[in-house]
Amino acid sequence: MPGMYYRDIPPVQNHLSFLKEHVIYKEAITIKYPLVLSEIHQTYRIVYIKDVILPGVLDEVTIASPSAIIPANNATVVLLLKDDTSFIQELFARMKSPSISDESKRNLDKWAKNLYLASMCYGRTVP
């Protein structure tokens, strides 16, 4: 019937357009490895799909598949960055620098905390 509202049918949304137009990657610190950057971007998109698109459409068993990819990607990022001593040194040097803005310090702090949490999930702490 025209004009009826069906709760089970979600409204049409253009998620790709949203990701391209509204999501901005804030690079708190330069990442030299293209693979690490690719894993970070892919993980963000998978989390978006899992948290925004799939819950209303798929069951928990099906959502488990992308949920397994997220820690694997995080492990790749941690493993690649843990051996890059210049990255870790630059991260902490920038965090200690008095010349960066408060917003940059907050972004670096969040980034360092996320890296640390990801490393703890695998029993590997970043030096």
Image (spheres, rainbow, N blue to C red):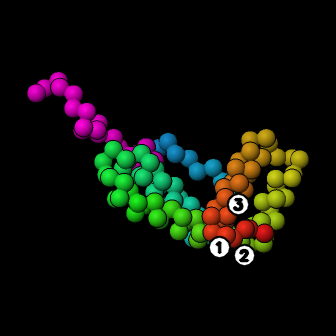
Residue shown at 47% from the left, 65% from the top: 69
On the image, numbered disc 1 is attached to which residue? Answer: 79
- Mark 3 to mark 2 CA distance (whole Å): 14 Å
- Asked if the residue under mark 2 is in contact with the one under mark 1, i.e. CB atoms within 8 Å, the reply is yes
Of residue 97 and residue 80, the one placed in the foreground of this image is 80
On the image, numbered disc 2 is attached to which residue? Answer: 83
Q: Let me know if residue 18 is in the magenta part.
A: yes
Residue 92, quarter of picture: bottom right
Residue shown at 70% from the left, 50% from the top: 110
Instruction: State which tag comes first along the sequence, 3 or 1.
Output: 1
Residue projecting furthest to the top: 3
Residue 124, image x and y in percent?
A: 69, 71
In the picture, the quarter occupied by the C terminus is bottom right
Tell me where the magenta segment starts and ends, as one range: 1-19
Instruction: Please give left or right for residue 94 compared with residue 59 in the image.
Output: right
Q: Secondary structure at mark 3?
A: helix
- Mark 1 to mark 2 CA distance (whole Å): 7 Å
Residue 8, quarter of picture: top left
- Amino acid type, label 1: Leu
